[in-house]
Image (cartoon, rainbow, N blue to C red):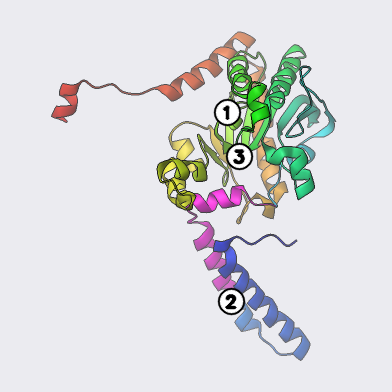
Amino acid sequence: MSFAILEFEKPIVELENKIEELRSFSDKKNVNLAPEVKKLTQKLEQMKAEIYGNLTEWQKVMIARHPARPYTMDYIHLLTTDFMELHGDRLFADDFAFVGGFAKINGKNVMVMGQQKGRDTKENIKRNFGCAHPEGYRKAIRLMRLAEKFHLPVVIFIDTPGAYPGLGAEERGQAQAIAENLRDMSGIKTPIIATVIGEGGSGGALGIAVADRVYILENAYYSVISPEGCASILWRNSVKAPEAARALKLTADHLMEFGMVDDKIPEPQGGAHRDPAFVAKHLKEKILRDIAELSSLSPEALVESRYQKFRRMGEFEHKAAAQVAAA
């Protein structure tokens, strides 16, 4: 399968093409080029290990946005069976940027949901590039309350540049819809497991991320603002996005260090699009383990544990001026 090539991957692709040319020439001309092919193959593996093992923050953002990267519906199909999509927020409309419904994971009934992007221009327009409107967030909390009613765990996939910032969304209460989700998710009396699978942008991501377990894929990002948005504010120049990405500390390793996520899910070398089944396998193991663990808690203990989890994220140390001066 061919993929769009990212800028930093070009040396890898050039060497892969060279190896393929040598193999083709060897077969056609019946010339033994095995030693040369072996040498270049070893060099290729070393190059991959060096490039993919030392990705910058901005390069990881590029992988998180890769057009072939698996989206929410891909993971739903890989992880679940008997998916039955539910529609509408019962207030305004159905938001195609947000999907959700009943499903089964290894025979276990769950409510699964998340933002959905499109593969081509037509679908991206329909899905609004994964940027949900207020009705998307209201649909999300409606489905969570439904899951709570039937005692079903909630499985969430996060993948959005951010909530839609258009005039219509603002008129219909975008900020209020997200704020109400933050409030109401903290009290949902059923297990909630969320995973950032691509982009985790701003309040658009946080609006469905108040969960008992929050995971992130190895090359995904989760940030208060996009690198381009940050660069535009700080330097008045979006070209500074790579520098902003570095300053934002938005990668999986940084987020684990700060206690913002519970764990990272490994990806194959080059990104999740190289082997979606590999990622789905690891993600499924986490989800099933967490469902069993969290389901053993009483509803009250579950809510209290979730509350304390997010309270700990706001801890800081306060020092008097005299202590600072003496330090």
Residue type at mark 1: give it.
Leu
| Earlier-in-chain disc, 3 versus 2 | 2
Q: CA distance from mark 3 to mark 2?
A: 39 Å
- Disc 2: CA contacts within 10 A as few (<14), some (14-19) or many (>=20): some
**As drawn, 15 above or below 326:** below
Residue on which the image places disc 1: 206
Query: In this figure, which residue is indicated by the disc labeled 3?
Result: 161
Q: Give yes or no for contact between labels 1 and 2 (Cβ–Cβ under 8 Å).
A: no
Q: Residue at x 44, y 40 (%)?
A: 233
First reached walking from the N terminus: tag 3 or tag 1:
3
Give the SS element for disc 3. loop
The amino acid marked with disc number 3 is Pro
In contact (CB < 8 Å): disc 3 and disc 1:
no
| Dot 3 and dot 2 residues touching (CB under 8 Å) | no
How far apart marks 1 and 2 lie (CA) works out to 45 Å
Visible residue check, residue 72 = no
Check disc 2 and report the residue beneath it.
40
- Disc 2 marks a residue whose amino acid type is Leu
Nearest to the eye among marks 1 and 2: give it: 1
Residue 201 picture quarter: top right
